[in-house]
Image: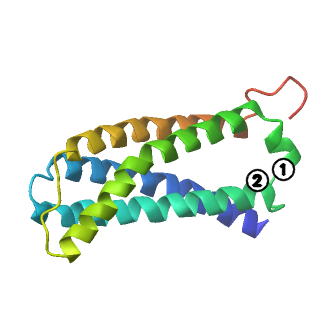
Amino acid sequence: MLVRWLLAAIHLLAYGFALASILRRTWALRRATVPAALRSVFRADTAWGLSALVLIVTGLMRAFGGYEKGADYYLHEPLFHAKMTLLVLIFVLEMPSMLALMRWRGALRRKDAPDLRRARAYARYSVIQTVLLVLMVFAATGMARGIGLPSGVV
């Protein structure tokens, strides 16, 4: 019981950290016009990545690790599928930003000037990811309340 509670708390807290860090990265990307501005982008991106990792690990443990209702419940829950679809969309949107940030980090290590012309586009991707993350919270809370299941299944 204690482990279930802690996993749930850590999972929920990770949503808050993820939201804060993706918003910080969005703000920093909008202002990334010179290489010196990238330090705040990189810090926010690291926080976003770590919080996403915690969300995924705790989510997998809760869904498939025997700590919650079990895989059978989740795999037959429509809102779980919606939540996982949103996660995949977030990941797809993350790919261009992640690759660009890797290139920018590499350029700075080589003491080259990174090409920051697409920073604002990556900020827009982050805004979309923020909306998708919030929708994941709605899916999760709906799932926790039995919304989306046929009556009598909960």
Q: Is residue 123 left or right of residue 30?
A: right
In the image, residue 142 above or below residue 5: above
Q: Looking at numbered disc 1 in the image, what kind of residue is underneath it?
A: Ala
Q: Looking at numbered disc 2 in the image, what kind of residue is underneath it?
A: Ala
Q: What residue is at 70 percent from the left and 33 percent from the top?
A: 79
Q: Quadrant of the N terminus?
A: bottom right
SS assignment at label 1: helix
Q: Quadrant of the C terminus?
A: top right
User: In this rendering, does residue 21 appear at all?
Assistant: no
The x and y percentages for residue 129 are 42, 41
Front-lying residue, 90 or 20: 90
Q: What residue is at 62 percent from the left and 37 percent from the top?
A: 85
Q: Which mark is residue 90?
A: none
In the image, residue 54 above or below residue 31: below
In the image, residue 139 above or below residue 113: above
| Extreme-right residue of the structure | 152
Q: Which mark is residue 71?
A: 1
* Quadrant housing residue 54: bottom right
Q: What residue is at 44 percent from the left and 42 percent from the top?
A: 93
Q: How many C-alpha atoms fall within 10 Å of the one at disc 1: few (<14), some, or many (≥20)?
A: some
The x and y percentages for residue 150 are 85, 23
SS assignment at label 2: helix
State if disc 2 and disc 1 touch (CB < 8 Å): yes
Q: Which mark is residue 63?
A: 2
Q: What residue is at 57 percent from the left and 38 percent from the top?
A: 86
* Quadrant housing residue 75: top right
Q: Is residue 82 left or right of residue 39?
A: right
- Going from N to C along the chain, the mark reached first, 1 or 2, is 2
* Quadrant housing residue 115: bottom left
User: In this rendering, does residue 122 appear at all?
Assistant: yes
Q: How many C-alpha atoms fall within 10 Å of the one at disc 2: few (<14), some, or many (≥20)?
A: some
